[in-house]
Amino acid sequence: MHRIQVSRHTYRLCLLLIFGAALFLRAYRLTEIPDIVHIDEAGLGYNAWCLANFGIDRYGNEMPIYPENFGGGQSPLYTYLVVILIKTVGGGSLSLTLLRLPGLLSSMLVVVLGTALISAVYENRKVTLTAALLLTFCPYFIMHGRYALDCNLMLGCSTAALFLLVRYVKSGRLSHLAAYSAAFGLVMYSYALSYFVVPIFLCLITLYMLWCRKITFRRAVLSALCVCAAALPILLFVCIMLFGLPSVSFLGFTLSPTAASRLADISLSNFRNNIIDIIKYTLTHDGRPLDALDGFYTMYAVSVPFILIGIAASCRRWLWDFRSRTFRWEFVFFSFYAAGLTAIGLSHGYLYRANYLFIAYLYFLVYGIVSVYRFVRFLRPYFIGGLGAAYLVSSVLFIRYYFVSYSPAQTIPQFVPACEAIEYARSKPDVRDIYIDYSGVSEFYTAFFPQSPYAIAETAHEDGFGNLHFSVTAETPLNPKSAYIVLKNNQAFLDCLKESGITWEIVEYSSHCLYCAP
């Protein structure tokens, strides 16, 4: 008994240390890595600031359930979490830390509840620790929570919902049924693709639970009602968007078709290719440096064969026991994965849009490792040693590169806010106009120097507002009374400045050069 007690304490201590490492890898230099601000981050941040201080988004929509963003929409959960942080912790002000904090918390939710999910399914401490280590050190689980992309919250929400579903299946308690149903309703606030993923998955898993006698028809109806109650504002918003209904107020929010243009993205025309692409991207990378890197992939190259083995083995397992009506956990993750692929097939297959698939990949990866471990009976010590060494080397190389050399600013410098240059230009008393090389995108300015959306709307014109201009082109007038903040790779305009005959004070920053009168 004493040995068992020590083992339990050691297990909990290991989990605590792993979770501590996970928090460090997600919080360390959060505002510096990545060293750019995604345009959707900037737009979300300014929207949240406007909502927190004025009750409207930057386009003037009053408390929208789906804030407007670049003519489309932005999922409400992330935006309103930032609103709450601004009104409480921030005291009305926005910072990059507050903007990225919900992503960090969601990432930690994936680590903690993802570990609990695998523990509930396997009831094996070694397997649970393996899952915790994978969640802590695999690249995608670290990277996706370090920048404020609204859709990334779907992974954390889906992980929580799946954990509560597993808990209901194991207990059969009515309170657990209400909890998992409400959780899947809340998932629908995290990302628009959940409008497809959640209904498809819940239909599949409910039919399977009915087949395996894990739920009664009455409880299935009750579950559906709980989902609809939790997601009622979103469901009403979808109806308004689909049928072109007029805007309505509901629970203090405005429901209006702000993202109706996004419906054009939904199509069956490229369904097969979208699915093929997203499987390839989620197992490797899609060329965008914020979610995965060539050479490390989303979960390291060593994981890919085990994920494929896990998918094949889990599919075979639940199909084998389907007729016997034996409930298999494999179906939970396979059906969630299938629902996710279906949603992606209807849209464009970008890696960040498929973030929720990674909780299924975690299960398949663990299942694949366990399957191979059981198969190589006499080589198990060598298998575990070799696999552990491969992950250790991969993790060390990735962490060293990510926290020392990783710099997306070198490939997409236009996403680097020129805050220091702007502050310096504004401090010059003789500068009348400031031209900023932001390609006509004001959000990189307003996210860090927020102004009343009412004031901006009153003074806005084609390329800026007031004495601020957010683009530089061949037609931009050159004047010694103006300041020009230009990207270093915009050689054409830099040459124009040098050949203008005007004497400039030149200040260099990481990605920009400031030209102003001395």
Image (cartoon, grey):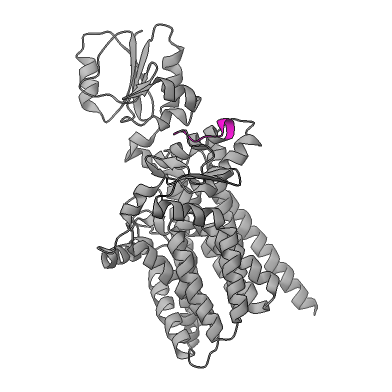
In the picture, which quadrant includes the C terminus? top left
Write the residue at 59% across / 67% down.
225
Whole-percent x and y of residue 389?
A: 47, 67
Outermost residue toward the front in this view: 246
Outermost residue toward the right in this view: 2
Q: Is residue 340 visible?
A: yes
Write the residue at 76% across / 77% down.
3
Residue 368 quadrant: bottom left
Picture layout, residue 404 above or below residue 482: below
Residue 501 quadrant: top left
Write the residue at 53% across / 59% down.
187
- In this rendering, the count of numbered labels is 0
- Using residue 512 as the reference point, say whether residue 395 is left or right of it: right
Picture layout, residue 427 above or below residue 458: above
Q: Is residue 143 visible?
A: no
Overall secondary structure of the magenta section: loop
- Using residue 249 as the reference point, say whether residue 474 is left or right of it: left
Residue range (magenta): 52-59
- Using residue 157 as the reference point, say whether residue 372 is left or right of it: left
Whole-percent x and y of residue 373?
A: 49, 81
Residue 281 quadrant: bottom left
In the picture, which quadrant includes the N terminus? bottom right
Whole-percent x and y of residue 246?
A: 45, 46
Whole-percent x and y of residue 271?
A: 29, 65
Write the residue at 44% across / 87% down.
319
Picture layout, residue 451 above or below residue 9: above
Picture layout, residue 52 above or below residue 276: above
Say if the magenta span includes residue 130: no
